Image: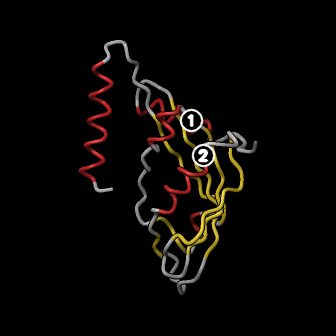
Amino acid sequence: MNLFIKKLIVVATFGTCSFFANAKMNYGDVQITHLEPIKANALWVREKQVTPMYPFEMAKKGIAGCGIYKVTVNQNGETEKVQQVTSLPARGLAKPAKKLIKKWQWKNVSGKPAANEEKLVRLDFCLGGNTVEEAQARCEQQAKFDCKA
């Protein structure tokens, strides 16, 4: 999805929210934690180190939580396979999280020859707070808790 469409969706969403005088704005945040290998020892790292947008389907349904995913990056730096290891809640995270991860592009930063690499990545999806900073703070706290159902 290109940047123009993303901005259009955000403007439309906020415009709809501002239409309702009593509507309370809730912010969302996504935190990524590289579990294995740790980022410093990884062959591949995400090319764009930006916070992904909160999946619209999850925000619409009010779904928040965390998930741990096994990600296979092939020797061409493409996400080859994504498998959910665990999540909390047990349902509702897998499909949007996998969709998000599959879009990631990877670059080899190790100086070693390109090869397949398995990674263990944790995604925390957090909703709530009156500002972006509050949502981010909630997500940082949530990321400290266990993510097993």
Residue 7 sits in which quadrant?
A: top left
- Quadrant of res 72: bottom right
Query: Which residue is depicted at the point 70% across and 44% down?
Result: 147
Left or right of residue 73: residue 132? left
- Whether tag 1 and tag 2 are in contact, CB under 8 A, the answer is yes
In the picture, the quarter occupied by the C terminus is top right
Q: Position of residue 36 (x, y in %)?
A: 66, 63
Furthest-bottom residue in view?
113
Mark 2 crowdedness (10 Å alpha carbons): few <14, some 14-19, many ≥20:
many
Q: CA distance from mark 1 to mark 2?
A: 8 Å
114 w.r.t. 145: above or below? below
- Indicate whether 144 appears above or below 48: above
User: What residue sits right under mark 2 in the picture?
Assistant: 93
Label ID, residue 16: none
**Residue beneath disc 1:** 63
Instruction: Tell me which residue sits at (65%, 63%) in the image.
Output: 70
Q: Residues within 10 Å of mark 1 (few under 14, many from 20)?
A: some
